[in-house]
Image (cartoon, rainbow, N blue to C red):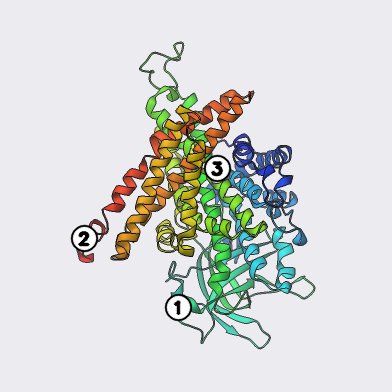
């Protein structure tokens, strides 16, 4: 059976040695001293390892069952959900006035990684609730907030998002769900939604669905979409639960992975709903939830890679196979452990350097969210907006690839279900698809985010990289060679790709769009390169200060060197592909495929 141990030490290193959270001027960060964050992360880690992780394989093998309109979650899920609620974890970074603990988002992100790595399917129930609550918090009336948020923050009630329909996914302007106004100010919601995560289950007293639908007579296409609050049970004026609403689960989807989460077909048959936000501005309100979800999905890519890597590492150290070509390392045994072999080391170093770099990238992104929201910083908001498709697309693509590498370390055992490695690969696969498929993330990055605010935010990122290189060059020859110079080169590749889009994309938009996926990955590599340079710098500072755990910091620097030497040069390949333009991609007529 797979194992999982929360990476508390590495998370603490990123928070305090790299991001220096406790000395940040972001409101609320002064409370994040090492002892406080250690206490939170240790407790979260125990819950993740001891309660959530043992249920991961249970959820995968049992799945959810639809019985008489009610979805039964896997054995142990309800009891575990009660423990999560009792600990106040769902409201960790939600406002105190609605029962939350008002901690910074960066702490919620760190804890979320642990929970997702331990059991992604389970953690989705509270994760989607958090997103739905955030949308109501941002766009709801005072009455709506008072009615729904206290119960959602505690996860007594859970939440969903309902976008996709059988005939439309990304192109939501094609949706057919209708919302007919009623005399009492409510709306009558009719239609069918598919792929609804946590759409029906037995772990909460009520489920609050956020549903996109069109009000008759509104504008055509996406401009005519509105967002509605549609509870499973209607809520009485005194807050008690009333009659069952006209919403039901018609089917549980049979999926490749995340079997422990109830992915439902939801039928709305004249259900009562209330407008959230403004008429015909549903996408604005929904994107509050979508953007949060996209960052959360990027976290899932990291989480599955981390969990898979931990198991691959244990197996590589334990499994005896072949002899080290430079001489036996286990002379008293029949063979040496797998980890002596260079190709196994390559695979493990790919996984380790990705997971640790991605963790730093994700937590840095979380500090930008805190800076934007807690300090009302428009520049930070613009920068995280730019980074959102990179975090979602790059971390989920790479995270999936890392689970495959981890599976490969096991050889044939990685393909056998009893070893549990296939679940990480199967569960990670959805992260590349939902909350906007990664191809759409790339199009969003190149088609919208690069030019946002006149290109201000991407230029700010380039200046950030340039300033880091300038401020830290010339102090140590080895650091210059192994970190500064590769980062400079990769950043120049990224800028060259952006220049190509500006020069060629105006003449032929397909020239830019054909290279968008490569650009997203190139951007991701540069971001991880920057994170590794910062981590190596922090690790060296700790060593110079006489840190007692020298092995940890020396391993950090060595892992960073690996990323800069072996992974970051991928930017050159991506640039070459981008510069090939649209012709190789668009050469064939549709009939010629």
| Observer-nearest of 374 and 193 | 374
Give the residue drawn at x 32%, y 56%.
Answer: 500
| Observer-nearest of 313 and 267 | 313
**Residue 147 located left or right of residue 531:** right
* Quarter in which the C terminus is drawn: bottom left
Residue 245 vertical position relative to residue 456 in the rendered view, above or below: below
Task: Return the disc, 3 or 2, that comes first in the chain's sequence.
Answer: 3
Query: Mark 3 highlights which residue?
Result: 360
Label for residue 130?
A: none
Image x and y of residue 537, in percent: 54, 33
Residue 27 shows up from this direction: yes
Q: Residues within 10 Å of mark 2 (few under 14, many from 20)?
A: few
**CA distance separating discs 3 and 2:** 40 Å
Instruction: Give the SS element for disc 2.
Output: loop
Give the residue drawn at x 61%, y 68%.
Answer: 209
Label for residue 221?
A: 1
């Amino acid at each position: 059976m797979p194992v999982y141990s929360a990476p508390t030490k590495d998370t603490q290193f990123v928070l305090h040695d790299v991001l220096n959270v406790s000395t940040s001027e972001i409101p609320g960060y002064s409370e994040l001293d090492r002892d406080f964050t250690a206490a939170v992360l240790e407790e979260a880690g125990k819950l993740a390892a001891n309660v959530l992780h043992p249920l991961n394989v249970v959820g995968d093998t049992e799945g959810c069952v639809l019985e008489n309109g009610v979805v039964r979650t896997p054995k142990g899920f309800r009891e575990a959900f009660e423990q999560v609620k009792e600990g106040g974890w769902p409201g960790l970074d939600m406002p105190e006035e609605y029962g939350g603990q008002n901690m910074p988002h960066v702490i919620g992100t760190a804890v979320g990684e642990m929970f997702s790595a331990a059991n992604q399917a389970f953690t989705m129930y509270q994760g989607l609730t958090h997103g739905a609550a955030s949308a109501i918090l941002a766009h709801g009336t005072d009455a709506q907030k008072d009615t729904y948020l206290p119960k959602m923050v505690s996860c007594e009630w859970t939440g969903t998002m309902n976008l996709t329909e059988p005939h439309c996914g990304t192109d939501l302007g094609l949706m057919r769900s209708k919302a007919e106004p009623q005399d009492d100010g409510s709306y009558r919601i009719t239609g069918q939604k598919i792929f609804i995560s946590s759409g029906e289950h037995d772990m909460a007293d009520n489920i609050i669905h956020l549903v996109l639908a069109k009000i008759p007579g509104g504008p055509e296409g996406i401009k005519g979409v509105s967002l509605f609050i549609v509870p499973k049970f209607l809520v009485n004026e005194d807050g008690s639960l009333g009659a069952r609403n006209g919403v039901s689960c018609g089917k549980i989807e049979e999926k490749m992975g995340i079997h422990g989460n109830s992915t439902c077909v939801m039928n709305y048959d004249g259900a009562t709903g209330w407008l959230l936000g403004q008429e015909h501005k549903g996408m604005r309100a929904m994107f509050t939830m979508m953007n949060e979800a996209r960052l959360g999905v990027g976290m899932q890519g990291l989480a599955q890679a981390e969990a898979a890597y931990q198991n691959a590492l244990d197996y590589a150290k334990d499994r005896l196979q072949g002899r080290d070509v430079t001489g036996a390392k286990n002379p008293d045994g029949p063979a040496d452990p797998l980890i002596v072999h260079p190709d196994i080391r390559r695979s493990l170093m790919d996984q380790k350097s990705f997971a640790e770099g991605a963790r730093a990238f994700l937590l840095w992104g979380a500090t930008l969210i805190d800076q934007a929201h807690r300090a009302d910083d428009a520049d930070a908001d613009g920068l995280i907006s730019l980074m959102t498709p990179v975090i979602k697309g790059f971390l989920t693509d790479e995270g999936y690839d890392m689970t495959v590498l981890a599976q490969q370390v096991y050889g044939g055992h990685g393909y056998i279900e009893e070893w549990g490695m296939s679940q990480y690969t199967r569960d990670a696969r959805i992260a590349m698809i939902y909350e906007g498929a990664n191809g759409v993330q790339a199009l969003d990055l190149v088609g919208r985010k690069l030019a946002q605010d006149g290109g201000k935010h991407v230029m700010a990122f380039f200046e950030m990289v340039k300033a880091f290189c300038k401020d830290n060059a010339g102090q140590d020859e080895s650091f210059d060679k192994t970190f500064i110079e590769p980062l400079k080169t990769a950043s120049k590749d990224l800028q060259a790709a952006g220049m190509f889009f500006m020069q060629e994309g105006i003449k032929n938009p397909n020239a830019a769009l054909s290279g968008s996926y490569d650009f997203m990955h190139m951007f991701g590599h540069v971001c991880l390169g920057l994170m590794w340079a910062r981590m190596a710098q922090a690790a060296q500072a700790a060593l110079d200060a006489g840190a007692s755990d020298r092995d940890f910091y020396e391993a950090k620097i060595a892992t960073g060197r690996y990323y800069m030497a072996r992974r970051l040069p991928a930017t050159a390949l991506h640039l070459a592909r981008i510069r090939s333009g649209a012709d190789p991609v668009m050469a064939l007529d549709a009939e010629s495929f």
